[in-house]
Every structure is written in C-alpha cells, then in structure tokens.
Image (tube, rainbow, N blue to C red):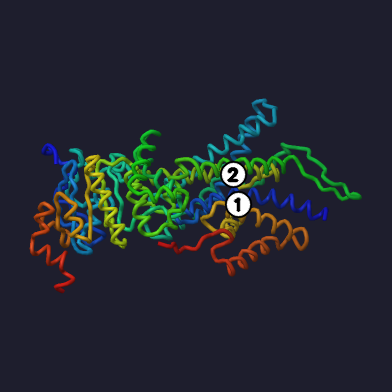
C-alpha cells in the first residue's frame, strides 16, 4: 500500500435499516479507505447484502449516515448514487436476461455517461479480465452459464468506471477454478488501477486472504474488525466461518 | 376472391389501428405489470384532439392537406402524450407500491374520468367530419365487383408502418429503449445502474399515448367521426389484441392487432356483422386455451 489514506472513501455510521418490521441492520459502522479491499463476512441472513443495498438506498436507511467521499448520500435517490460511480455486482447477479451481453455491458457504461473512448477502454479492460465475455457478446444474458453470468455482472459494474466496486458473493455457485479466476481479477484491478473494493463472501478464507481489512457481521451488527490476516487467525472466526463444517 | 381481397385490405387497416393502441397496453404491462384500462380513452382523447386541431387549422385558412395532416399528427401526439403522462403521474405513480389491484382500479376510474370529461367538454353527440383524404385506386374491376384501395387506407397503413419502424428503432437501439427494457426486466437493478425508473415509466406512458393518438387520428380519418365513448370498445379490442399477441411482447401487440382486425372484418364479411365482437373474443379464448401466453408471449418462468 502507498501513502496512508487521508479520508475514507466510504464511511458508514450507526446505520439502521429494516424490511417492514424485521430489522436487518442494527447500527452498523464501517469504513473503506481509498485503494482498499475490504471483506465483509458473516453467516446467511447476517445483513451483508442488505448493507450493500442500503448504501444504494434500497431499502432506505432508517437512521444513521452514509458518507461517500465526504458527501452524505443517505438520502440520495438510488439512480443518482450510481452516477457517483459506486457500482455493485449484487446478490443473485441480476444481469438482464433478455438483453445481449453487449447491451448488459452498455447498461453499465450508461450509468456514468462515459465518452466513446472511455467506453472502448472499459470494454478492453473487461475483455482482458474475462475473455469469455468477448466470445459471447451477441448472446442473451439469460443463456449464459452461472460463471459467465457472474463475469458479466462484474464486467457490467466495471463498465461504469467505479470508484467503489461492491461485489456480493462473486464466487457463489462457481467451480473453484472460475472462482479463483474472479478473485485474481479483483486483485489485479486493485493493484493495477487502485480500485477500492467491498466484497461480501461466504468463502471467508478466500475473501480474507484477498482483503486488506475485514469485518464480521452477526445479526445486523459488526462484531469484529481487523486486517485480513488478523481475522484469519482469530479462533472464533476459524471455528465459525472456516472450519465450522468440520467441527460441526 | 375479389371479395376476399377487399376484406383483406379493410381488415389490415382496422388491424393497424388496433395494433397501435395495443402497443400502449403491452408496453405498460411489461414495465409496471398493470393493465392501463384508461388507455382506450387516451385513444379517444387523441381522436378528439386530432379533430379539434384539424378544425382550427382549417379555420385558420390552411388548405394544403398533407401539411394539415402532418401538423394534426404532431399536435395530437404531443397533447395526448401529455394526457398519458398526467394520468400516470396523478393516478398510478402514487399507488405504485400499494397492493397490486390498486393501480388497476385507479385505471378503471381514470377511464371513466376521461370519457366523462370528454362528454362534458365536447358533448355526447357523435362528431362527424367530412372526408379529409379522398380518392383511391381501383385494383380490380371484375364485372362490376370492384376491389378498391382508398387513399385513406394507404395513409393509415403507411403511417402505421413508419411509426412502428421509428418505435422499433427507439426500443432496440436508443438509450431510452434500453432503459425501458432494463426496467421491464429488473427495476431494482436498473436503478442500481443509474436508470431513473420513475422517468422511464413516465416515458413509457408518453410513448404509448402518442401511438394511441396516432390511432385516434387514423380512426377519425378512416371512419370520419369521433365520440366520447369510442375509447371503450376500441380499448377492449386492442387489449384483446395485446393478450392474443402475448401481453408484454411488442411484435405480439402488432400481430394481435392485425389478427383481431382481420378476424372481425372477415367474420362480418362472411357471417354476420352483429357477431363480429363475439368472433374476436372467441378466437382469443381458443388461442389462450392452447397458448396461454399468447401468440408471441413468453412463459413467466425465467431460467436462472
């Protein structure tokens, strides 16, 4: 890492959010510095995906504050948040099934009104990471395999030239080889372009190895934070997220 | 054969009008999942605005028919689009996150509001206009039986084709069209990608209303009359066309429109005029029994 970052790119303060009466976030504090990869780990239903969506105002925060680059975005409408160059590859990938791969990527480019040259450069970058997408450009999104859809969801997010990239379970349901390919791609983007990444993962081992820092979320609250290496050593993390299956 | 050819021409013209209205139903259904029951009345409003702007232009002393028609077309598209936008804004948007039936009930209410408003503002009598486009071509003259293609029919069909071409290009190639399709497929994701969903939905209503206005004007030209109640039957027919073609499918709406137009015309020609509506709706039922998603519709279940 280069010079110590002055101000966090994203700062979340005592954020609360709910779906109807069910409170999903119960006062979350989190920050992401520019150029960092931050991992968010936790069990199913802990509120990880909700946190990512709440940053985009869906659901809207009940209380608390979300600051992006020093600006309060808590009440900014969802579509304007995308224009600030925050991109998300959401839970379930959510690619547009009846649009071609090219159009899906174009939707990403549209998010930030980039120039023709920037769009071309973006496509080059996506194709360099996921050459498979180049072969599939005219194919409809819904006909891609799961791994290809994941690549497309990440590629689409990258097309908006994000300052903050949020990835929700990029390795879910993927063959280990493809999962590794995706993690490698994220690392490359971070090292080469200084891209700031927030990654939610079930695969805590992979995520914490990749990340500079990590947060552990339990029942809508952050219970632990630390560097990736620190968290990997914590016995409670090892028991709950890394070896839980084996110890049972 | 000559008789059939003549009915084919008539059916295609009627079908073009239905198709233009049906697109509005199917677009709105695709993007917000509701049936806009006020759409037939938007078509009626379009007919009235075409009539009024026609009379205004004539009283201003304009005589060049093509110029008049062009101005009438643009004016009625613009003003009717404004109606479409307003209806969505005041009657549907506030209910968007309410229970599913709420916007539909509101749409039925808007349908009454629009037709009663026209009745009050314009009177209940049928408003005739003298034929604006006259003349035509005799395609066949077989011992007194004449197959005629009138200039009005040519205008209706060509206008429909041109508008459909523009519309298809808009949906397939432009940013607005892409945004509309994105909203249709996944509104939340569209918003995450910077699409202003409310604005895109508004535009859908605007475009649907503009096409309905064209249909209204074509109806005025073709039948030479408008009345405040004409939106009801035409709306139901166009809705049937949209369902027949597969609700949510744009080519389906046009195909359904043509099918309904042809069925109605052929039934009137060979069986009885009184039962033409029964014929159209019966075919709908038969098609839906064997193809529940319509001719070009897709099943609801998506492969994930």
In which image quadrant can residue A6 be found?
A: top left
Disc number at residue A41? none
Residue pictured at 44% horizontal, 58% vertical: A143
The quarter in which the N terminus of chain A is drawn is top left
Q: Which residue is mark 2?
A: B164
Circles 1 and 2 in contact, beta carbons < 8 Å: yes
Q: Which residue is mark 1?
A: B254
Residue pictured at 15% horizontal, 67% vertical: A243
- Vertically, is A169 above or below B135? below
Q: Is residue B146 left or right of residue A104?
A: right
- Vertically, is A132 above or below B47? below
Residue A82 x/y as whole percent? 31, 43
What crowding class fits label 2: few (fewer than 14 Cα within 10 Å), some (14-19), or many (20 or more)?
some
Residue A214 x/y as whole percent? 15, 53
Q: Is residue B43 left or right of residue B154?
A: left
Residue furthest toward the top? B61
Q: As rendered, which of B90 and A87 lies closer to the eye?
A: A87
Q: Is residue A6 visible?
A: no
Q: As rendered, which of A164 and B60 lies closer to the eye?
A: A164
Residue pictured at 48% horizontal, 40% vertical: B174
Say which chain tag 2 marks: B
């Amino acid at each position: 890492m280069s010079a110590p970052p002055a101000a966090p790119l994203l700062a979340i303060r005592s954020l609360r959010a709910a779906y109807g009466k069910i409170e999903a976030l119960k006062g979350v504090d989190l920050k992401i510095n520019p150029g960092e990869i931050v991992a968010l780990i936790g069990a199913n239903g802990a509120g990880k995906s909700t946190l990512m969506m709440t940053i985009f105002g869906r659901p809207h925060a009940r209380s608390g504050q979300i600051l992006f680059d020093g600006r309060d975005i808590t009440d900014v409408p969802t579509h304007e948040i995308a224009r600030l160059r925050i991109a998300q590859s959401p839970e379930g990938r959510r690619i547009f099934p009846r649009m071609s791969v090219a159009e899906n990527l174009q939707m990403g480019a549209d998010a930030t009104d980039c120039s023709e040259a920037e769009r071309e450069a973006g496509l080059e970058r996506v194709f360099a990471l996921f050459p498979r997408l180049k072969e599939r450009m005219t194919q409809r999104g819904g006909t891609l395999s799961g791994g290809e859809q994941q690549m497309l969801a990440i590629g689409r997010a990258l097309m908006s030239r994000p300052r903050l990239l949020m990835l929700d379970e990029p390795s879910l349901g993927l063959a280990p080889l493809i999962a590794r390919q995706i993690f490698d791609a994220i690392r490359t983007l971070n090292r080469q372009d200084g891209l700031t990444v927030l990654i939610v993962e079930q695969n805590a081992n992979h995520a914490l190895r990749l990340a500079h820092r990590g947060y552990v979320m339990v029942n809508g609250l952050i219970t632990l934070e630390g560097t990736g290496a620190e968290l990997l050593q914590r016995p409670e993390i090892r028991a709950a997220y890394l070896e839980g299956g084996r110890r049972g | 054969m000559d008789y059939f050819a003549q009915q084919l021409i008539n059916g295609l013209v009627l079908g073009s009008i239905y198709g233009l209205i049906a697109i509005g139903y199917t677009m709105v259904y695709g993007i917000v999942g509701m049936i806009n029951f006020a759409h037939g009345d938007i078509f009626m409003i379009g007919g009235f605005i075409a009539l009024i702007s026609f009379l205004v232009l004539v009283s201003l002393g304009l005589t060049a028919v093509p110029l008049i028609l062009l101005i009438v077309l643009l004016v009625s598209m613009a003003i009717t689009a404004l109606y479409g936008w307003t209806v969505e804004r005041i009657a549907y948007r506030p209910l968007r996150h309410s229970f599913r039936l709420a916007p539909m009930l509101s749409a039925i209410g808007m349908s009454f509001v629009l037709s009663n408003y026209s009745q009050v503002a314009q009177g209940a009598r049928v408003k005739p206009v003298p034929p604006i486009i006259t003349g035509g071509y005799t395609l066949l003259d077989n011992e007194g039986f004449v197959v005629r293609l009138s200039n009005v029919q040519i205008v209706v069909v060509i206008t429909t084709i041109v508008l459909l071409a523009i519309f298809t290009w808009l949906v397939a190639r432009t940013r607005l069209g892409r945004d509309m399709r994105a909203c249709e497929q996944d509104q939340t994701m569209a918003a995450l990608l910077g699409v202003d969903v409310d604005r895109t939905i508004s535009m859908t209503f605007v475009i649907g209303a503009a096409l309905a206005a064209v249909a209204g004007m074509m109806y005025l030209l073709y039948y030479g009359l408008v009345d405040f109640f004409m939106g009801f039957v035409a709306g139901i027919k166009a809705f049937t066309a949209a369902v027949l073609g597969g609700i949510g499918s744009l080519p389906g709406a046009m195909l359904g429109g043509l099918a309904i137009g042809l069925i109605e015309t052929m039934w009137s020609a060979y069986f009885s005029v009184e039962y033409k509506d029964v014929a159209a709706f019966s075919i709908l039922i038969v098609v839906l029994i064997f193809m529940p998603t319509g001719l070009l519709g897709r099943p609801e279940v998506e492969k994930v």
